[in-house]
Amino acid sequence: MCMRSITFKRAIDVELLVQLSVALLRLATCSRKMQLRRRNCLIMLTTSVLVPFSFIFFISRPDLSHEEELVQRLAELQVRLQYLEAVYRARQEDVAALQPTLDSTAALAPAIQGLLRNMTGLRSANGLNNTQIKGLRMPSSFHFLPHLLDNPLSIRPAFLVSNGRSGVSVVLGIPTVRREKETYLLPTLHNLVEAMNSEEAADSLIIVFIAETDMEYVLQTARLIENQFPNQIESGLIEILSPPASYYPDFDKLKMTLGDSLERVKWRTKQNLDFVFLMTYAQPKGTFYVQLEDDILAKHNFVTTMKNYAIEITAKKQHWFVLDFCQLGFIGKMFKSAELPWAITFFQMFYNDKPVDWLLNYLIVTKICNQDKDSKQCKQDKSKLWVHYKPSLFQHIGTHSSLKGKVQRLKDKQFGKVSLFFPHVNPPLASATSDIRTYKHYTLSRAYMGETYFWGLFAQQGDHLTFTFRNPITLTRFYLRSGNVEHLSDKFYNTTIGVLPVKNVVANQNFTQEGFITVGHFDSLGIAEGNVDPRLGKILAVRITVQSDSDTWVILSEIHFVEAEQS
């Protein structure tokens, strides 16, 4: 055991020496370049030396009892360094972009030209003037998307709500588009936020990409998100952005591929470009990037599970490219942000040719498969770069696709069973009545007892659901949830909550002729919750009142009435 500990400590020392060597090499390289880059060099030196040294010093303390924990911490450091390397390369690209400006100094005085040559380290062995030595023009996004050159604002967000959060462990990307039937975005965001604990929320970033160019729709959707999640917007957990119209090519001039209709080619082409824009924006903001969709359900603590698994795989020295936390489509795919440019570039190259999940598969095949081997060997090799995690952490809940007329009922069987209702122990009832016709055995009384959910046919204006308590209670709080993950649209809309006090409360004006006082309403998520004013005294009944006709069925999947504790 002692020998193993010494060996492991030597491995840490070697790792530290490597980091120091790389940092010193960068500093030496930077010293030969223009003065403009010296600040970047110092920043990179700090990042490459001090940060790793601090981490390694921390994990090398003798009070840690398990070598496995040291391995995990070292793996976490490794992926973090890869992310910092990517940030550094981005700064290098910024400096390289300034080089043409330095090359166009022919009109400057000879003394200034000489000074610039000394700063940049440019020398000409054959006597040519430095302005005659042209750099190579490497392919870029403009080669694959030449229309971007028509407008300098094509690759700048047209709309952005951001608190500037960056440097997190996990970035979650959610593209969303206008849907004809129903939208799943707000329930998806609500589920993601609820599934995070406080530590996960502080070390994550959710980017909602509204992939539409109709600014009125973009603003409308953004307002809905801001109204529902004000705290998450303020803290920086949620960001919202949309692309400019000039980012997209002329979809009527696309190449027809795979024998698909023009409408389908347009749909998958735009989807590919949406992923490219979102990934490019998200890439510098965190260590890992996870691709999600706007119609999913996540398991609790999914962020910690994904992060720990990524570090565990890295600690085993397995060079993965994708960690797959959902078996469907492009949902739940995790990338190291440092390697995300591989996917971005590949999607740009073939955005008009194949769907995005096909392209990801071809990218993995290109990276690892040997064409001289059979498909069975290729599949085995792919599993090394594309690692599947079970059970799945995400479930697809949408039914209506963003492609017009397409119905998608696919479910991930690895996710497990999904709760369709949430039972609670409620105060004893005398009766539970409903004016809405009940479907099969999904009665209101059974829902109140926590045995199932209430499911009724089309609600009409003036319909009531009434809960009458066996004995009057001191009601302090209520929580009612409508709809469920299998029937998201079966919610209460324009529906209020009223309570019936035992004593008349003259001071309160929000009462009906029957004596019920309005204390809340269902929001756009289909949830009604609130506190009850203790001045109302004992409550005899709670009533749900439908204020307008509904064109959908209704589900009441959670009923919780909180009674004051008896002294």
Image (cartoon, grey):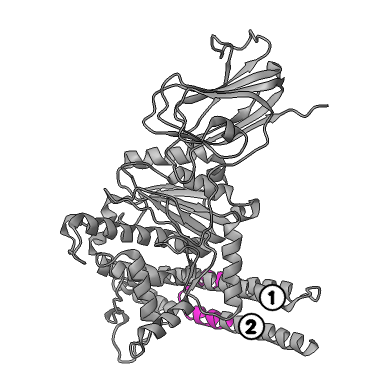
Q: Is residue 529 above or below residue 262?
A: above
Q: Nearer the viewer, residue 59 or 51?
A: 59
Apparent side of residue 41 relative to residue 14 in the rendered image (left or right): left
Q: Quadrant of the N terminus?
A: bottom right
Q: Position of residue 315 (x, y in %)?
A: 61, 77
For badge 2, the amino acid type reads: Glu
Residue that badge 1 annotates: 56
Discs 1, 2 touching: Cβ within 8 Å: yes
Label 2, secondary structure: give it: helix
Q: Is 503 in the magenta?
A: no
Q: Please report the bounds of the magenta region as a residue range.
A: 24-44
First of labels 1, 2 by sequence position: 2
Residue pictured at 27% horizontal, 55% vertical: 267
The dominant secondary structure in magenta is helix
Residue pictured at 55% horizontal, 30% vertical: 444
Q: Position of residue 221 (x, y in %)?
A: 40, 41
Residue that badge 2 annotates: 15
